[in-house]
Amino acid sequence: MAEKMIVIGSDHGGFELKEAIKALLRERGLAVEDMGTRDGNSVDYPDFGERVARKVSSGEAELGVLVCGTGIGMSIVANKFPGVRAALAADPYMAKMAKQHNNANILVLGGRVLDENEASEMVATWLDARFEGGRHQGRLDKIAALEKELYK
Ligand code: RB5
């Protein structure tokens, strides 16, 4: 089976946490593509959110992780892209639900909100959780139908 590919990105507010998560993903044996930023210098979060969301939207990457200061800006950007379901999670329960109910293909975290341990637990929980389908699939179908109507 092809290796699961994850893209990751951040702005300066999420840089340190992004680096920690990248290491964790690689420890888990996942192929990670880092779309930047490369240091803590100030940058604009839409530029990096776009890079990650494009890869997930096009199917080039199965999953993505985005980090900015709060996670809010990154989630706003990522959810502009068709097929992207970016979930801003604040704790492990939300990270688990993001997969079980929403089948989130991008997990968004706040680098100034979470500590590294908490964030690592959230990433692991999201990766390990399984989408429940059923009625939840019906709801995702409604979102996909909205995208079709709005973006034609
Ligand atoms: C950068 O200062 C900050 O605005 C950004 O990281 C993010 O929190 C935006 O939503």
Image (cartoon, rainbow, N blue to C red):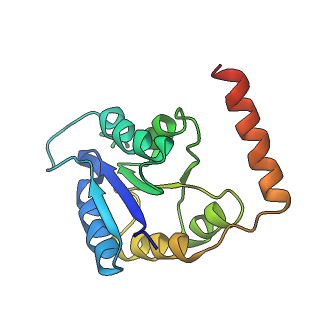
Residue at far right of view: 135
Q: Is residue 43 visible?
A: yes
Please tell me which residue is depicted at 72% across the width and 61% down the height of the picture: 101
Please tell me which residue is depicted at 59% across the width and 41% down the height of the picture: 83
Please tell me which residue is depicted at 59% across the width and 47% down the height of the picture: 85
Q: Is residue 109 visible?
A: no
Q: Is residue 123 left or right of residue 100?
A: left
Q: Quadrant of residue 148?
A: top right
State which quarter of the image contains the C terminus.
Answer: top right
Q: Position of residue 10 (x, y in %)?
A: 30, 49
Q: Position of residue 72 (x, y in %)?
A: 47, 43
Q: Is residue 78 left or right of residue 82?
A: left
Instruction: Identify whether 78 is placed above or below 97.
Output: above
Q: Position of residue 63 (x, y in %)?
A: 47, 57
Residue at far front of view: 1
* Total count of labels: 0
Quadrant of the picture in which ligand 1 is shown: top left
Instruction: Identify whether 84 is placed above or below 21.
Output: above
Q: Quadrant of residue 111?
A: bottom left
Q: Is residue 81 left or right of residue 97?
A: left
Instruction: Identify whether 137 is placed above or below 142.
Output: below
Please tell me which residue is depicted at 59% across the width and 56% down the height of the picture: 104
